[in-house]
Image (cartoon, rainbow, N blue to C red):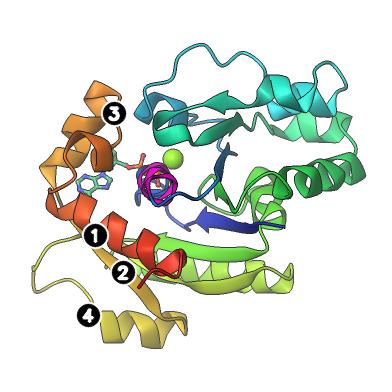
Amino acid sequence: EGRSIVFASGKGGTGKTTTVANIGVALAQFGKDVILIDADITMANLSLILGMEDIPVTLHDVLAGEADLKDAIYEGPAGVKVIPGGLSLEKIKKARAERLRDLIREISQMGDFILIDAPAGLELTSITALLIGKELIIVTNPEIAAITDSLKTKLVAEKLGTLPLGAILNRVTSEKTELSREEIEALLEVPVLGTVPEDPEVKRASAYGVPLVVKNPTSPAAIAYKEIAAKLAGIK
Ligand code: ADP
Ligand code: MG
C-alpha cells in the first residue's frame, strides 16, 4: 500500500495546489508511481497547472456508480496520475462514506504515493480530504495568521487520526516580518520539511500549464520542491 499524504492549510492561497503538482511530478521523475487527487472542487486547478484538459469523470461519478475508477484516472506530466475529486458537500451526502473509504483503499494500492490537494479551511470538504490521507503536510506561508490557521487544521487532522508529518513553508522571502523556521516549528509543533522561496517562475509555469519542475527545473522554487520530494522518497 502506498503512502497517502494530504496537503492542507488553514488559509487559502498558501500554495497547496502548486506544491502537490510539483512534488508529485518530482516524485514521478524519481521513478515513483504517483497519484494526485484533486479534492478542491471550488478551486479545481490542479489539472490546469499540470496542463491537462478534458477531465470529465470525477471521483464523485465513481462513488455514484456512474463510472469505473479507471475512467477517472488521467495521465499527466512524467506519468503522474491525476484523479479529479469532485467531492462537494451535497455530492458526499449522496455517496456513501463507506464507499469513499473503499475507493480510497483501492486507490492506495495503485501507487507509491497518493497526494491529496485539499481545500483550505475546515469545511466538510476539507475534513473529507483530511480523512482521505493517512499523513498530513501543512502548506503555509511564514506569517502569523497563516500559522494560527494551520495549527487549527493540524489539531483537527490529529483528532481524525491523520498523522502530521510536518510543514512546508511556501513563498518565503527574507523580509523581517516573516516568522523564522524555528518560531514556526515551535508554534506548530511539527518539523519544517522544506522552505520554498517566492519565485516568479511559479506563476509563469502555471500560465504555460507546465509544472515548474518540468518547465524550469533550475529555478529556486523547483529546486526546493525537488529537495522535498527527494526527502519524501527517502533519496536524501
Ligand atoms: P492554494 O492551492 O493553496 O490555494 P496555489 O497553489 O493555487 O494555492 O497558489 C496560490 C497562488 O500563489 C498562485 O497564483 C500561485 O501561482 C502562487 N504561488 C504559489 N507558490 C508560489 C511561490 N513559491 N512563488 C510565487 N508564487 C507562488
Ligand atoms: Mg488550491
Sequence-wise, the earlier of marks 4 and 2 is: 4
Whole-number angstrom distance, CA of label 1 to CA of label 4: 17 Å
Highlighted range, magenta: 21-29
Q: Are marks 3 and 2 in contact (CB under 8 Å)?
A: no
Residue 168: quarter of image: bottom left
Q: Are marks 1 and 4 in contact (CB under 8 Å)?
A: no
Q: Looking at the picture, how far across and down is residue 160, in whole percent? A: 74, 67
Please state, as top left, top right, bottom left or bottom right, where the C terminus lies in the image: bottom left
Whole-number angstrom distance, CA of label 4 to CA of label 2: 13 Å
In the rendered image of this protein, does residue 121 appear above or below residue 193? above
Sequence-wise, the earlier of marks 1 and 4 is: 4
Q: Amino acid at mark 4?
A: Ser
Q: Amino acid at mark 1?
A: Ala
Sequence-wise, the earlier of marks 1 and 2 is: 2
**Residue holding disc 2:** 194
Which of the labelled discs sits on residue 180, or is there none?
Answer: 4
**Residue holding disc 3:** 210
For disc 1, does the CB lie below 8 Å from ligand 1?
Answer: yes
**Residue holding disc 1:** 224
Whole-number angstrom distance, CA of label 3 to CA of label 2: 22 Å
Q: Are marks 1 and 2 in contact (CB under 8 Å)?
A: yes
Whole-number angstrom distance, CA of label 1 to CA of label 2: 7 Å
Q: Nearer the viewer, residue 113 or 33?
A: 33
